[in-house]
Image (cartoon, helix red, strand yellow):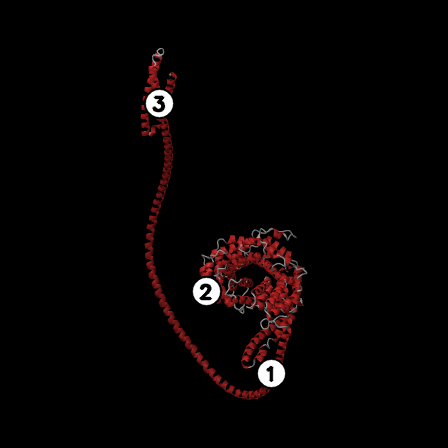
């Protein structure tokens, strides 16, 4: 569907819904809103034409109506928030259509139901809309919104708390009126306590929001001095750098960087940051983010680095971190290699500075500003030699940016971006040219043709802007083009000595009649730097034969007259509004309205011709109705003109009568003046004599007072000298006493030092003996443990021997029984009697010996228990005895 057709259908649906708020009309309107959101027609909606403006005004009115369904209101807010991502659309929604006031009104109407999803949606959209934007004082329900935020920061819903804190941080930042309103609240101390408790929250986003609000409200107060003192500020620095490096989302990183940027504006906190011990490490980690592919992150990091460069010590640290070690030199024609070699922050800066024009404008603008700061530090510190290689690479890449864009799509938008970026590039080159060696590099790389084409493009573009519709953006862009032209000419002036062709081109451009516009704008500017640059160029151009000095004078006079006329018109409009207010008290309302709006009729007609909608006075009115209003106003002006003509004729008659009275008055006044002159001459003579006498009297009085004061001072000085002399004598006596005490104490000190050395030697010897004794004690303890283990082993051996002895006794008993049996059978063994008798004797002898051995062993066992030192010999004896016993048993068995 066509965009215009879709917008017409949307406007028709809005009117139907306003006339009849039925569910069918609401569903139809919601469908048309969804169709518009799918078309991506943000450029058409915010172009300033009548149809899109009526659509936006109707949507604002429907959304701001408390009777509208919440679903339809949420759809409208989603549509408008979708377009708020664009900078121009965001500015139009904020300033022209009062979208902020509409959202604040919705929040105010639903303040009693904080759990409503529409309220959270409005808070989130307001947070996005008010980020880095100063709140307008005319926003409706702004005070109620602040009260709502202060009340609901303690909500149980984390999303509501986070949205309230983020919106409060946006409103408080750089807005003194909002800060004063918050401080005037009765519950501000409880609000401070709540914010302080949020500093220990587990969500880093909440912590950063709370810190941002506290810094905006209490930085210069007693609470802020306690929070951001020397003890706590290092933790704040560490938190900000951790969030910036590690990140808790892009939103949190942006607020953390903004917080540090705001804190650096305080000289005391900037001094604390210079003394932060982890600053170098944090700075290197922050510089590592420049290699990120996220453009928003890189631009925010570069914004932080530019703010750090505002402090001289920090600018030196940033310069050393970025430009050392020097970047390697690339070969010609390898611009893509800048991104691949991302190990150095300097190369990353070059990459972002040379990013395409269709990318985010903030990214390459911040990169060029940071490079200008770094080279300014290098030149001021007189250490430009280490930056030579990086300067060669930078000039090779940056000088390409001065060439005009060759894209055919979106030429006007690209030209605007190219104009802004070219200004930053020329600023960087002007900084680089302050050093002689770097100026030579620029002269080798830069050609006069590039400068000429740059100036030609900007001059032609500036003329197109001047001839087109005179809007605020075009006027601002025309001024920027003029500034860039003058800066380019200043750059050519610096390089003309090294480049003869540059000098010829420079003087040829100065004689161009189109140079009148930028010179006149700069000479009549309020900026001191622009005036100085224009004067330097004018001094170069004035001696030239074809310089259009007359046209320049006429242009300056025209600019001055235009500014004077603007001042008069503004004064007249203010006085006319006052007159209209006064007239409204005396006359009828229609007449007051016509007289009050008479002075602004020209501006209203101009706005009507440009297609702009008068949001403040007329809403949802057709063009025919607006023309009818202006026709009525014009007829009222014609009536007023006829009345003024009648008054003028009456005043002419009164003027002739006044002339006669004035002539009579002049004659009487001449006589009175003659008499007054005589009296005045006499009075002057007396006054002169009186003044002479008074001067002499005053001089004499002054001399008397001086003499009195001198004598008094001499007496006081004499008394002081006497007191000093007495003190000197007393000090001499005390000095002698102290000298004697010093000699005695010095002698005692020497004796004590000698005693101290002897005691230290004794202590060292005692330490050594103590260590030796400890080693001996450890050895004896180890030996004692070994001996105890040996004793345990001996006890086990003795038990085993006792068991063996009991076995031998049993065997002996059995043998005795055998002997008795043999004696009974002696009759049977008479033949072997001698042998058996002999064997019996031998066995009896052995048994007696065994009994003797048993008694000896028992005695030895008792001795072993008493004398542990002789355990080795006893073990050998036990072994020898046991071996003899075993041998006897064996022989006994054999004999049997």
Q: Is residue 708 visible?
A: yes
Which sits in the foreground, 343 or 516? 343
Q: Do the residues labelled 1 and 2 touch (CB within 8 Å)?
A: no
Q: Can residue 527 be seen in this view?
A: no
Q: Which of marks 3 and 2 is nearer the N terminus?
A: 2
Q: What element carries label 1?
A: helix
Q: Give the alpha-carbon distance from disc 1 to disc 3, as whole Å.
A: 163 Å
Q: How crowded is mark 2: few (under 14 residues within 10 Å), some or many (20 or more)?
A: some
Q: Earlier in the sequence, mark 1 or mark 2?
A: 2
Q: Name the residue under label 1.
A: 644
Q: In which quarter of the image is the N terminus?
A: bottom right
Residue farthest along the top direction in this orientation:
831
Q: Is residue 851 above or below residue 50?
A: above
Q: Quadrant of the C terminus?
A: top left
Q: Which mark is residue 188?
A: 2
Total count of labels: 3
Q: Viewed as shown, does residue 699 lie left or right of 122?
A: left
Q: Where is residue 4 in the image (x, y as percent from the top left)?
A: 66, 66
Q: Comparing marks 3 and 2, which lies closer to the viewer?
A: 3
Q: Where is residue 274 in the image (x, y as percent from the top left)?
A: 49, 56
Q: Position of residue 667 (x, y in %)?
A: 54, 88
Q: What element carries label 2?
A: helix
Q: Is mark 3 on a helix, strand or loop?
A: helix
Q: Comparing marks 1 and 3, which lies closer to the viewer?
A: 3
Q: Mark 3 points at which residue?
A: 810
Q: Give the alpha-carbon distance from disc 3 to disc 2, as whole Å.
A: 108 Å
Q: Which mark is residue 473?
A: none
Which sits in the foreground, 614 or 271? 614
Q: How crowded is mark 3: few (under 14 residues within 10 Å), some or many (20 or more)?
A: few
Which sits in the foreground, 256 or 95? 95
Q: Is residue 441 above or below residue 791?
A: below
Q: In this view, does 554 lie above or below 786?
A: below
């Amino acid at each position: 569907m066509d965009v215009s057709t879709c917008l017409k259908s949307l406007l028709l649906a809005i009117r139907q819904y306003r006339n009849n708020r039925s569910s069918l009309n609401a569903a139809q309107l919601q469908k048309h809103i969804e169709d518009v959101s799918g078309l991506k027609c943000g450029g058409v909606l915010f172009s300033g034409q009548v149809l899109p403006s009526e659509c936006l005004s109707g949507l604002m009115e429907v959304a701001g109506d408390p009777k509208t369904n919440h679903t339809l209101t949420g759809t409208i807010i989603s549509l408008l928030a979708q377009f708020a991502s664009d900078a121009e659309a965001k500015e139009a929604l904020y300033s022209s259509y009062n979208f902020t006031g509409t959202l604040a009104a919705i929040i105010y109407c639903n303040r009693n139901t904080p759990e409503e999803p529409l309220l959270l949606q409005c808070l989130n959209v307001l947070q996005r809309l008010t980020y880095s934007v100063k709140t307008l004082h005319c926003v409706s329900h702004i005070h109620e919104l602040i009260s709502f935020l202060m009340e609901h920061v303690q909500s149980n819903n984390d999303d509501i708390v986070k949205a309230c804190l983020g919106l409060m941080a946006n409103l408080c930042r750089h807005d003194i009126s909002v800060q004063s309103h918050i401080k005037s609240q009765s519950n501000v101390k409880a609000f401070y306590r709540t914010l302080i408790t949020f500093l220990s929250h587990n969500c880093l986003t909440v912590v950063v929001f709370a810190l941002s609000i506290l810094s905006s409200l209490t930085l210069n107060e007693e609470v802020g001095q306690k929070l951001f003192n020397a003890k706590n500020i290092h933790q704040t620095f560490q938190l900000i750098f951790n969030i910036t490096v590690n990140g808790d989302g892009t939103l949190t990183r942006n607020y953390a960087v903004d917080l540090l940027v705001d804190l650096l504006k305080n000289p005391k906190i900037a001094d604390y940051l210079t003394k932060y011990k982890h600053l170098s490490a944090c700075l290197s980690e922050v510089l590592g983010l420049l290699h990120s592919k996220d453009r928003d992150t890189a631009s925010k990091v570069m914004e932080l680095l530019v703010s750090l460069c505002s402090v001289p010590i920090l600018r030196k640290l940033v310069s050393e971190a970025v430009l050392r070690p020097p970047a390697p030199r690339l070969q010609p024609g390898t611009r893509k290699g800048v991104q691949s070699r991302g190990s150095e922050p300097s190369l990353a800066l070059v990459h972002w500075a040379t990013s395409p024009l269709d990318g985010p404008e903030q990214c390459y603008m911040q990169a060029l500003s940071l490079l200008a700061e770094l080279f300014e530090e290098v030149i001021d510190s007189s250490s430009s030699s280490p930056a030579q290689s990086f300067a060669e690479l930078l000039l090779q890449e940056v000088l390409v940016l001065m060439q005009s864009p060759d894209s055919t799509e979106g030429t006007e938008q690209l030209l605007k971006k190219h104009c802004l970026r070219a200004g930053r590039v020329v600023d960087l080159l002007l900084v680089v040219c302050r050093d002689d060696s770097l100026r030579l590099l620029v002269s080798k790389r830069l050609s006069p043709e590039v400068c000429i084409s740059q100036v030609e493009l900007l001059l032609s573009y500036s003329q197109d802007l001047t001839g087109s519709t005179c809007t605020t953006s075009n006027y601002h862009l025309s001024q920027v083009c003029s500034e860039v032209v003058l800066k380019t000419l200043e750059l050519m002036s610096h390089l003309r000595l090294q480049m003869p062709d540059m000098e010829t081109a420079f003087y040829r451009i100065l004689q161009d009649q189109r140079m009148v516009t930028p010179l006149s704008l700069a000479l009549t500017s309020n900026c001191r730097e622009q005036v100085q640059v224009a004067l330097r160029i004018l001094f170069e151009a004035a001696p030239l034969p074809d310089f259009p000095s007359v046209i320049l004078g006429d242009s300056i006079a025209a600019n001055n007259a235009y500014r004077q006329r603007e001042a008069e018109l503004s004064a007249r409009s203010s006085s006319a509004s006052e007159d209209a207010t006064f007239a409204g008290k005396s006359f009828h309302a229609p007449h007051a309205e016509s007289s009050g709006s008479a002075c602004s009729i020209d501006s209203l007609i101009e706005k009507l011709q440009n297609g702009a909608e008068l949001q403040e006075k007329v809403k949802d009115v057709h063009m025919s109705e607006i023309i009818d209003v202006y026709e009525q106003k014009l007829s009222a002006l014609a009536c007023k003109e006829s009345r003024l003509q009648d008054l003028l004729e009456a005043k002419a008659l009164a003027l002739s009568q006044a002339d006669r009275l004035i002539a009579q008055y002049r004659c009487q006044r001449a006589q009175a003046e003659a008499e007054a002159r005589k009296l005045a001459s006499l009075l002057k003579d007396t006054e002169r004599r009186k003044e002479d006498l008074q001067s002499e009297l005053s001089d004499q009085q002054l001399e008397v007072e001086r003499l009195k004061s001198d004598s008094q001072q001499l007496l006081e000085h004499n008394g002081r000298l006497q007191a000093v002399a007495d003190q000197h004598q007393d000090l001499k006596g005390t000095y002698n006493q102290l000298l004697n005490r010093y000699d005695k104490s010095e002698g005692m000190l020497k004796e004590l030092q000698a005693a101290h050395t002897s005691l230290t030697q004794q202590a060292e010897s005692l330490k050594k003996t103590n260590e030796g004794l400890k080693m001996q004690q450890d050895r004896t303890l180890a030996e004692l443990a070994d001996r105890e283990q040996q004793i345990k082993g001996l006890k086990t051996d003795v038990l085993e021997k006792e068991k063996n002895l009991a076995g031998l006794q049993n065997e002996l008993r059995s043998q005795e029984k055998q002997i008795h049996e043999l004696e009974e059978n002696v009759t049977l063994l008479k033949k072997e009697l001698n042998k058996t008798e002999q064997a019996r004797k031998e066995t009896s002898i052995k048994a007696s010996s065994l009994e003797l051995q048993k008694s000896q062993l028992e005695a030895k066992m008792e001795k072993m228990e008493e004398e542990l030192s002789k355990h080795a010999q006893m073990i050998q004896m036990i072994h020898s005895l046991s071996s003899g016993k075993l041998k006897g048993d064996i022989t006994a068995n054999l004999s049997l």
